[in-house]
Image (cartoon, rainbow, N blue to C red):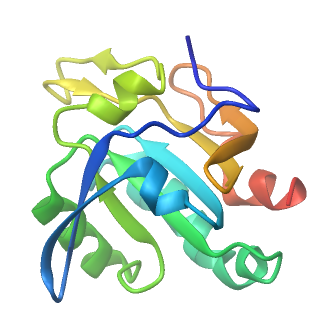
Amino acid sequence: MTIAAQDALPEITLHIKDEDGLQELTLAEWAKDKKVVLFAVPGAFTPTCSARHLPSFLDHYDAIKSKGVDAIGCLSVNDAHVMKAWGDATGASGKIDMLADPEAFAADAMGLAVVKTPVLGNTRAARMALIAENGIVTHMFMEEPAAYEVSSAENVLKHL
């Protein structure tokens, strides 16, 4: 079942690579005592993710933060090194937490419709966004397959 409003974010380990090296934390720890926005993408450096989804959160970063959001996270089924490189290439590093879910454990735990495609080559998370307060989901925006509408920063901002 897909994670929904009133559900807790899972205790699944993710990785973040930053200037201090590789860090491990659970999704629940990342969101503890904070208001967060989390969005998931099928893959770093992929067309819609790089041209529209991640940039929408960069373009609206200040507006989202002004609504009391403590952290914005981008979750993808990629390793931490790829997520760091993507964050650096797009200017997201230092603003958006690039959360690596290399084995899709978080995607599976949240019940995201993971997809296997010949183009991407392995299991991926479906595109979505959510708002959570102290680790509890308050709003969930799940995309239909191949769509990019409800998980945009513009839509999330309307619900903050």
Percent from the top left, x then y, of residue 7? 66, 30
The residue under the point 59% across, 29% down is 147
In screen coordinates, is 122 left or right of 152? left
In screen coordinates, is 67 left or right of 128? right
Task: Indicate whether 52 appears above or below 138.
Answer: below
| Quadrant of the snapshot with the N terminus | top right
Residue nearest the observer in this picture, 131 or 133:
133
Residue 52 visible here: no
In screen coordinates, is 67 left or right of 75? right
Percent from the top left, x then y, of residue 151? 65, 44
Task: Indicate whether 136 appears above or below 113.
Answer: below
The residue under the point 60% across, 36% down is 8
Task: Indicate whether 105 appears above or below 117.
Answer: below
| Quadrant of the snapshot with the C terminus | bottom right
Q: How many marks?
A: 0
In screen coordinates, is 14 left or right of 27? left
**Which image quadrant for residue 136?**
top right
The residue under the point 69% across, 75% down is 60
The residue under the point 42% across, 49% down is 27
Percent from the top left, x then y, of residue 46? 30, 48
**Which image quadrant for residue 64?**
bottom right
Residue 40 visible here: yes
Residue nearest the observer in this picture, 154 or 20:
20
Percent from the top left, x then y, of residue 21? 10, 79
